[in-house]
Every structure is written in C-alpha cells, then in structure tokens.
Amino acid sequence: MCDASPSARWIFLPVAYDPKERRYLVDHNYLSADLGERVVRDAQTINQALGYEMNTIEFAVKQGVPYAIDFLNPAPDLSATASRNSISNMSWIVWLGL
C-alpha cells in the first residue's frame, strides 16, 4: 500500500529486498493485499510509538507473519549512490522531499 498524496500524514512504500544481490527491488506487488496492509499498519504503529516523521523499517516474513527486525532508522541512508536504492525508489524519495 502506498499513499503518496501530498496531504497524506504517513506515506509508506513497501519494497522487496534481494539478499543475494543485496539490493531493493522494484516490485510493488510482491506482498498479498492482506500482508501488505498488515506491514503498513505495523510500520505506522512503530513510527507513531517512536515519534518518527521519517524512518525505514525492515520486516522479515515467516509463514505469513511479518516481524519488524530493524526499525530504528530515523535518518536512513537515502543517497542516490547507496547500493540498495534503485533509481525508481530514489525518485520517490526525492519527491517526498519537495
């Protein structure tokens, strides 16, 4: 689920990660609708509890259950040269900063 409207309070972009290639992938349909909604809801809960306006959260999914495994990134590495940021994701990040 991605709510990228300018008036949105929270904006989430779930992305897949390939551990073999050590990079994020452009595949926004890799989660089922139910799992995607759960991940976004859990990410929103974590961000609200921590008081973060910006954050990256990594989830591991085992047997359909998402587990937040890394969620303390209020100043994540969002540089265009970061090996794990694709051009598509970088455009999205830049758009958020406008």
Image (cartoon, rainbow, N blue to C red):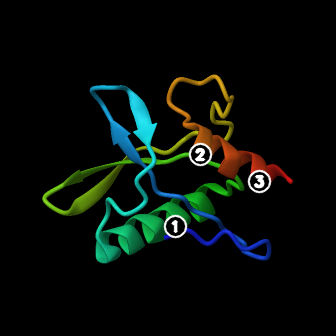
Q: Which residue is denoted by mark 3 in the rendering?
A: 95
Depth check, front residue: 70 or 3: 3
* Image spot of residue 56 (x, y percent): 55, 46
Q: Which residue is mark 1?
A: 45
With 89 as the anchor, is 60 left or right in this view?
A: left
Say which amino acid is labelled 3.
Answer: Trp
Tell me the crowding category of disc 1: few under 14, some 14 to 19, or many 20 or more residues within 10 angstroms, Cα based.
few
Along the line of sight, which residue is nearer the eye, 32 or 74? 32
Q: Secondary structure at mark 2?
A: helix
Nearest to N terminus: mark 3 or mark 2? 2
Q: Earlier in the sequence, mark 1 or mark 3?
A: 1
Residue indicated by mark 2 = 89
Q: CA distance from mark 2 to mark 1?
A: 23 Å
Q: Earlier in the sequence, mark 2 or mark 1?
A: 1
The answer to whether 2 is drawn above or below residue 81 in the figure is: below
Q: CA distance from mark 1 to mark 3?
A: 24 Å
Q: Residue at x 37, y 63 (%)?
A: 29
Tell me if 45 is positioned left or right of 74 in this view: left
Q: Position of residue 52 (x, y in %)?
A: 68, 54
* Residue 27 against residue 23 in the figure, above or below: below
- The residue positioned 58% from the left and 61% from the top of the image is 49
- Given the image, on which type of amino acid does mark 2 rest? Asn
Taking the spot 67% from the left edge, 51% from the top edge, the residue there is 92
Tag 1 and tag 3, C-beta contact below 8 Å: no
Tell me the distance, in whole angstroms, between the alpha carbons under discs 3 and 2: 10 Å
Which of discs 2 and 1 lies nearer the camera? The answer is 2
Q: Report the amino acid beneath label 1.
A: Thr
Residue 82, image x, y percentages: 59, 24
